[in-house]
Image: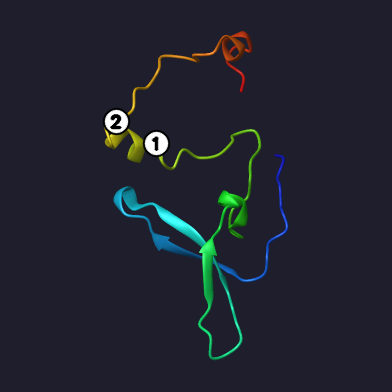
Amino acid sequence: MKTIEPPRPEGRRVYIEGGQGGLRVPMREISLEAPNPPLRRYDTSGPYGDPDYHADLERGLQRLRLDWIRSRADVEELPGPSSAERRARGTSI
């Protein structure tokens, strides 16, 4: 199994509830000097910023938002790749 362990910025990862579907939005919480409260910013590192996540490059990322996207009923799922370039590559991504 191949794994990836990127460097993590200072602070700690926290989550806020993301509304429908039970999604959790990752935030990086950075401690500041008193009397300032901790600063929270959106953590763009995806699952790689989670210290409990261990990447499996063979399996790829989980499709955490798929059910949420489908439930919105405002997208059309195509039966296959729509670009000639992607179709030429076959099923590999």
How far apart are the two marked residues, 1 and 2, measured between alpha carbons?
Answer: 13 Å
**Residue 68 horizontal side relative to residue 8, left or right:** left
Depth check: 18 or 53 in front?
Answer: 18
Residue at the spot x=39%, y=36% of the render?
66
Residue 78 at what x, y percent from top left? 40, 17
Q: Along the polypeptide, which appears first: circle 1 or circle 2?
A: 1
Instruction: Identify the element where label 1 is drawn.
Output: helix
In this view, the residue in front, 83 or 60, is: 83
Residue 30: which disc?
Answer: none
The residue at 71%/53% (across/down) is 6
Note whether 58 is above or below 8 in the view shown.
above
| Left or right side of 80 for 93 | right
**Three-letter residue code for mark 1:** Leu
- Residue 90 percent across, percent down from the top left: 60, 11
- The answer to whether 92 appears left or right of 70 in the picture is right
Three-letter code for the amino acid on which mark 2 is drawn: Asp
Tag of residue 66? 1
Which residue is disc 2 drawn over? 74
**Image location of residue 74, percent across then percent down:** 29, 30
Tell me the quadrant of the picture where the C terminus can be found: top right
Q: What element carries label 2?
A: loop
Residue at the front extreme, as displayed: 36
Q: Assess whether mark 2 and mark 1 are in contact (beta carbons under 8 angstroms).
A: no
Quadrant occupied by the N terminus: top right
Q: Position of residue 11 (x, y in %)?
A: 62, 71
Write the residue at 35% across / 36% down.
69
Q: Foreground residue, 22 or 3?
A: 22
